[in-house]
Amino acid sequence: MEMTVAQLAERIGAETVGKTDGANQLIGSVAPVDTAGPGEVTFLANDKHRAAVEACGAGAVIVAERLEGLDKLQLVVKNVDLALIEDLTLFAPKLKPAPEGIDATAKVAEDAKIGPGVFVGPGVAIGDVAEIGENSVISGGCKIGENSKVGANCRLDSNVVVYHNCRLGDNVIIQANSTIGATGFGYSFIDGSHRLIPHNGGVVIEDFVEIGANCCIDRAKFGNTVIGAGTKIDNLVQIGHNVRMGKCCLIAALVGVSGSCKLGDGVVLGGQVGMVDNIELGSGVMVAAKSGVINDIEADRKVAWTPAIDRREAYRIISLMMRLPEIAKQVKKLGKRMDSLEAAEDDKN
Amino acid sequence: MEMTVAQLAERIGAETVGKTDGANQLIGSVAPVDTAGPGEVTFLANDKHRAAVEACGAGAVIVAERLEGLDKLQLVVKNVDLALIEDLTLFAPKLKPAPEGIDATAKVAEDAKIGPGVFVGPGVAIGDVAEIGENSVISGGCKIGENSKVGANCRLDSNVVVYHNCRLGDNVIIQANSTIGATGFGYSFIDGSHRLIPHNGGVVIEDFVEIGANCCIDRAKFGNTVIGAGTKIDNLVQIGHNVRMGKCCLIAALVGVSGSCKLGDGVVLGGQVGMVDNIELGSGVMVAAKSGVINDIEADRKVAWTPAIDRREAYRIISLMMRLPEIAKQVKKLGKRMDSLEAAEDDKN
Amino acid sequence: MEMTVAQLAERIGAETVGKTDGANQLIGSVAPVDTAGPGEVTFLANDKHRAAVEACGAGAVIVAERLEGLDKLQLVVKNVDLALIEDLTLFAPKLKPAPEGIDATAKVAEDAKIGPGVFVGPGVAIGDVAEIGENSVISGGCKIGENSKVGANCRLDSNVVVYHNCRLGDNVIIQANSTIGATGFGYSFIDGSHRLIPHNGGVVIEDFVEIGANCCIDRAKFGNTVIGAGTKIDNLVQIGHNVRMGKCCLIAALVGVSGSCKLGDGVVLGGQVGMVDNIELGSGVMVAAKSGVINDIEADRKVAWTPAIDRREAYRIISLMMRLPEIAKQVKKLGKRMDSLEAAEDDKN
C-alpha cells in the first residue's frame, strides 16, 4: 500500500505544516528516524530525538506540536502513539488471510462446536465438547482440550496447547508454543515421596488478553487461575496455579508469579521479576525488573530490588552499596584516628 | 461425582465430629475456605485460617485434630494433605479417557515397539527402534526420536519433543511443549568461531519424575544427563548437559542449572535460581528463590542470595543493607565528632 | 564405529607417545576422565585433572603436551578442544539420516519453493512464497510462515515456529519448540487500554547461528530484529523486538534482552542476565550471570551485578557486603569509644 503524504494526513486526521510542498510524496511504510527515507514517514515521540529528526531523510514527520524552524513536512496529531499505530496498521505487510474452515488434517471431536468464520489449521486437535467462537483462528499444531472454550475473534498461533476445562474470552491472542492449563507445581511430601495435589480447577482468560510465545499459565487446584481483561503478557512467563490477575496488567518476559498470588488491576511487572506464593499486589503496583517480591504491596506503590521495597529507598540503598568501598575506608580511618586519640588520652592519665 | 459427608468420611478414613447432623449433606467438590459452600468440603491446613473456617459455609471441614467449639461438621484425619489429595482425586472432573491405539495421522517407524494399552495421538512422530511402554499416553504433536525409550504408564502431553537416545522410566509425566534431549550449550572458540562440541550422550529420566511445561533438559556430551527418580520440575526450567540430579528433588520455575552440575537427593531449588556449571549440591540442600549458586554446597545446608551463602547469614546481611542509610549517617556523624575531638586535642597542644 | 588408537591418532593428526604398546587397542567412544575405560579415549583439558588422568582406565589420553612420567598412551595434539570435537564426531551415535522429500502429511503452499535435498517432516506447514534452501531439514511439526526464507543446510528441529517475513541464512540450527518472529511486547496506553503497536518488521538470522530449545526471537516493529552470523544462543532465551545482535555472541540460558538493544560482536551474556530496553553493549563485552544491565557498556568491558558495573568493582562491593556485619559492629564500637572520649573530654572542661 502506498499513498501520498496528503492522503496519509487525511487518514490519520493530521494537520500538515512546514515544508508542505512535499505533500504529493508517496509513502509506503513507517521507519524510525535514523533509517527513514523519502518514501517513509517517521515520528518524534521524544524531544531528545529532535536533532535526529532535523537530519533525517523521511518524507514526513509525525509530531505532537509543530516544530518551528524544522525544514520538513510535519504531520501534527493529537496523539503520536495513536498515529503511529494507525500508520503501522495502514502500511502493514499484506498477508494472505487465514482461510475459513477446518483443515483436512485437523482432528475435531464430533461434539465440539466450531463457530462460523473459524479457521482450524493443519494438525490441530480439538477435544470433546470444546467450543471455538466465531471468526477465531486456531493455527496449525494447536491442541484444545476437552470442554475448553475459546471465544470469538481469538487468535491462537501455531502449536499452542490449551488443556481441558479452560475458558478464553473474546479477542484473546496467544502466541506460538504457549501452554495454558498445565497442572501446577503443588506437591505434598507424604511417606517419603512428593505426591501431586490434583488440580481440579481450570484457567479463565478474559477478553482482550494477549499472551506471548512459550508462556505457561497453570490451571488451579480448585476454582480457576484468572487473567483479567486487557492484560498483556510477554514471552516465557510463568503464571502459577490459582493466581488471580486483574485487568490491564503488563507482565514482561521471564517473570515468575508463584501459586495463589493476587494482582490488582494495572499492575506492571518488569522482566525477570519473581513473586513468592500467596502474596497480594494492590492495583497500580509497579515492580522494577529483576525484583523479588516476598511481601504484600499496597496499591500504587513502586517497588524494586530483592526483597522488593519502596523504589526510592531501594535506589538509595543501591547507591550506598556502590559507596561501600569508600564507607569501609572511612570506618578504618576512623578506627585509626580513634586509636591515636585514645593513646593521647592514655598518655595524659 | 457426589456423595454424602458420611460416605466421604468412610472413603478417606475420617472420624466425623462436631455438628454431625450434617452427615447426609451431599458433597461434590473440594474448595478453599473462603469460597466453600454447603455442597463442598474444605480443609484446615494451617491454624492461622481457624477464624476463616469458623466463618465459612462448607458442608464439612477436614482437620488434623478436633477443633473444640467449632460449630461445623469436622472430618478428623491423620494427614490433612493426604486427605486433600484423596478428596481432590474423588471429585476430579471426569475426562474422557485417552483411547487406546495409534491415531491414523501419527507416524510410527516400522521397527518402533508400541506396548499394549498405549495411546499415540494425532500428528505424533515416533522414530526408529523407539519404544513406548504399556499404558503410556503420547499426546498429539509429540515427537519421540530414534532409539528413545518411554517406560510404562507415562504421560507425555501435547507437543513434547524427546530427541534420540533418551530413556524415560515408568510413571513419568512431561507436560506440554517441553524439550528433552536437545544439544547442550557447549562450544569451543577455535580459529575465530564458536565450534559446537558434539553431544554424543543422552538423557535418562528415572521413574516417577514429573516435568512441567516448556522445560528443557539437554542431552550429555558423553554418558547421560540424569534426573533422579521422584524428582519434580516446574515450568520453564533449564537443565544443562551432563547434569546429574538425585532423587526426589524439587525444582521451581525458571531455574537454570548449568552443565555438569551434580545435585544430591532431595535438593530444593526455589524459583529463578541459577547455578554456574560444574558445581555440586549435597543431598537436602535448599536454595532460596532467585539465588545464584557459584560454589559447592554441603549436604543439608540452606542457602540464599547471590552469591549463595548460608541463609541466616544472607538474611543478616540483607537486613544490614536495609540499614545502610543509617549506617552511612552514623559514619558521617562519627567523622564530625572525631573532627571536633581532634580539634579540641590540637587546641590543647 | 571402532578403530585402533593408532588409527585414531592418524585421523586427528596426533603424535602417540608414552605407553605406545597399547596402539592396537580398539576405541569406540570418548569419555570423561572419571569414567573412561580401556575402549575409550579421554582428554586432559585442564591441568587440575592430571592426577585423575593418572588413575583413569582410558585406552588413550589426548593431551596438548607430552606428560612426563605418565604411564598411559598419550595422543599429543595442537588443540585438545579441536581433537575432542573430531573424536566426538567420529564416535557420534549413528542415526538414520533424515530422508529427502516432503512427508505426505506436510502442508506446503503451492507457491513455496523447496530446494533439492530438503526434508520436510510430518505435520509441517509451510506458507505462501516461503523458501527452503537446499539440504535443509525441517523436522516434524514445524511451521514456516508466509514469505519466510530458510537458507541452505539449515536444521529446524521439531515444532519450531517461524512466523511470516523472517529470513534465516545458511547453516542455521534452531532446536525444538523455539519461536521466531512472534510479535514483540510493544504497547501504548491509549484511552484506558493497552494498544498493541503493530510489528511490521521481521527477523533476520544470519549464517551459522545456532539457537537452543524453547527460545523466543521477536519480530521488529519496523526493519528487522537481527542475530549476527555465528552467534550461539542457549535455551529459554528471550530476544525482544528490534534487537540488533552482532556476530559470534554467546547468550546463555534464560537471558532476556529487551527491545531495541544493540549488541556488538563477540558479546557474552551469562545465564539469567537481563537488559533493559534501548541500551548498547560494545563488542567483546562480557556480562556475568544474573546481572541486570541498565546502561550502555563500552567495548571489551567485563561487568557484573545489578545494576551491572565493572566486574572487579562489583566483586569488591560484594565482598564488602559479606563483611557488613563486621563493619556495622565496628561502627557501633566506634560510637561507644567516641562516647567515652567525649565524656572524658567533658569531665575535663
Image: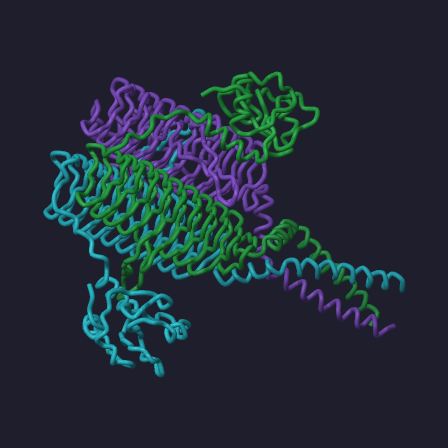
Chain colours: A green, B cyan, C purple
Q: How many marks?
A: 0
Quadrant location of the C terminus of chain A in the rendered image: bottom right
Q: Position of residue C240 (x, y in %)?
A: 46, 36
Residue at the outermost left position: B116
Q: In this view, does A339 lie to the left or right of B57?
A: right
Q: Toward the viewer: A81 or B332?
A: A81
Residue at horizontal 31 percent and vertical 45 percent from the top: A150
User: From the viewer's perspective, is residue A317 above or below residue C278?
Assistant: below
User: From the viewer's perspective, is residue A154 above or below residue A23?
Assistant: below
Q: Where is residue B52 in the image (x, y as percent from the top left)?
A: 40, 72
Q: Toward the viewer: C297 or A253?
A: A253
User: From the viewer's perspective, is residue A198 above or below residue C113?
Assistant: below
Q: Position of residue B94 (x, y in %)?
A: 20, 56
Res A105 visible:
yes
Q: Toward the viewer: C134 or B330?
A: C134
Residue at horizontal 23 percent and vertical 77 percent from the top: B23
Q: In this view, does C266 lie to the left or right of C117?
A: right
Q: Is residue C307 left or right of residue B181?
A: right
Quadrant location of the N terminus of chain A in the rendered image: top left
Res B280 visible:
no
Residue C135 location, quadrant: top left
Residue at horizontal 72 percent and vertical 56 percent from the top: A333
Q: Position of residue B222 (x, y in %)?
A: 29, 39
Q: Toward the viewer: B206 or A257?
A: A257
